[in-house]
Amino acid sequence: MTRSKYIAGILAIVMVSCASEAPLTDHEWDYHATLDIADSLGLKENEARILLLPAPLQVPNNLKLTGADYHPSLLVELSKDAASRTQYEAAIAVGLYATDLGYSIMFEDYSTGMQYAKTIESILQFMNIRIAEKNVLAKRFEQHRNSMDSLSVLVLESYQKAGQYLQENQQEGLGLLMMVGCYVEGMYLAFESINTEKGYEAFASMWPQQNLYLDNVLMLLGYYSAAGEADILIEGMSDIKVALAQWMKLDHKRLNKVEQEKQAEKVRTVIWNFRQSIIS
């Protein structure tokens, strides 16, 4: 009997099912960047451990509930040139785009969401990750395009299938890279929305959970086999953690608006710089 590898919230991608029986492109992927979560965590046969990790709808849903405004200008610009991406770049891009997909549908910008859904599907196909059938995500998105609840369910269901696929195909390293993209984009959207006292309160309410997600991602990055890639990501994610933790310790009620914005800009710069470094 194999060990249980159930990890809650393992990935930040959408609509994946069974493995591809043959390459969908001539592109050769180098799967040197591996990760076996069960081995890394020292799980024995029939043991399980639940880790809370980033998912595409977490931050967008929080922003919507707290009355934040929607800013489509914040979204990552879509790139259609999948063939120029490395495996590393493609996996991170899926995470970034998945959060932007969640953000756009949560604020009922369905036409933009459709574009992100199509792009994610295209990248996954290019990575030889078989979609249930060609263009199924785009088709299902079109069927439910005017229902935020239905689209949210679609994303969450697909998210679970993605985790199962990558575990079964020994590609958990790719899942970790996708989580990095998902988390960074979520923090970028959240912090860019902090321009009022209400915005600060909204971020403060989500920070304990987001800090836990960040700690878990950093832990898993320590087990990631591609040392050079892991070091870069650990450094960037650690910088974000330090900047946000310091900002949360400030007594914001005692700061005037000028000082509040000055302190917030320091954090925005840290998040933005790392985000730019992983956008392909």
Image: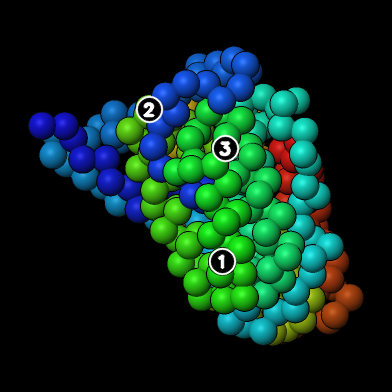
Q: Of all residues shown, which one is farthest toward the left? A: 1
Q: Residue at x 48, y 62 (%)?
A: 154
Nearer-N-terminus badge (1/2): 1
Q: Amino acid at mark 3?
A: Leu
Residue toward you, 156 or 268: 156
Q: Position of residue 112 (x, y in %)?
A: 74, 62
Q: Is residue 273 left or right of residue 121?
A: right
Q: Is residue 62 visible?
A: no
Per the image, the residue denoted by label 1 is 143
Q: Is residue 171 above or below residue 152?
A: above
Q: Secondary structure beneath disc 2?
A: loop
Of badges 3 and 2, the one in the foreground is 3
> Of discs 1 and 2, which sits in the foreground?
1
As drawn, the label of residue 124 is 3
Measure the C-alpha gap from mark 3 to mark 2: 16 Å
As drawn, 37 above or below 156: above
Name the disc covering residue 170, or none: 2
Alpha-carbon neighbours of circle 1 within 10 Å: few (<14), some, or many (≥20)?
Answer: few
Q: Residue at x 27, y 40 (%)?
A: 5
Q: CA distance from mark 1 to mark 2?
A: 33 Å
Q: Position of residue 205 (x, y in %)?
A: 54, 75
Q: Residue at x 67, y 24 (%)?
A: 86
Asked whether disc 3 touches disc 1, contact meaning CB atoms under 8 Å apart, the reply is no
Give the secondary structure at mark 3: helix
Quarter occupied by residue 148: bottom right
Q: Give the Cα separation between the discs numbered 3 and 1.
A: 21 Å
Q: Secondary structure at mark 1?
A: helix
User: In the image, what residue occupies the spot 39% across and 37% down?
Assistant: 18
Tag 1: residue type? Gln
Estimate how packed mark 2 is, as few (under 14), some (14 to 19) or many (20 or more) residues with alpha carbons within 10 Å. some
Count residues near mark 3 (Cα–Cα under 10 Å), then give few for <14, some for 14-19, many for 20+: many
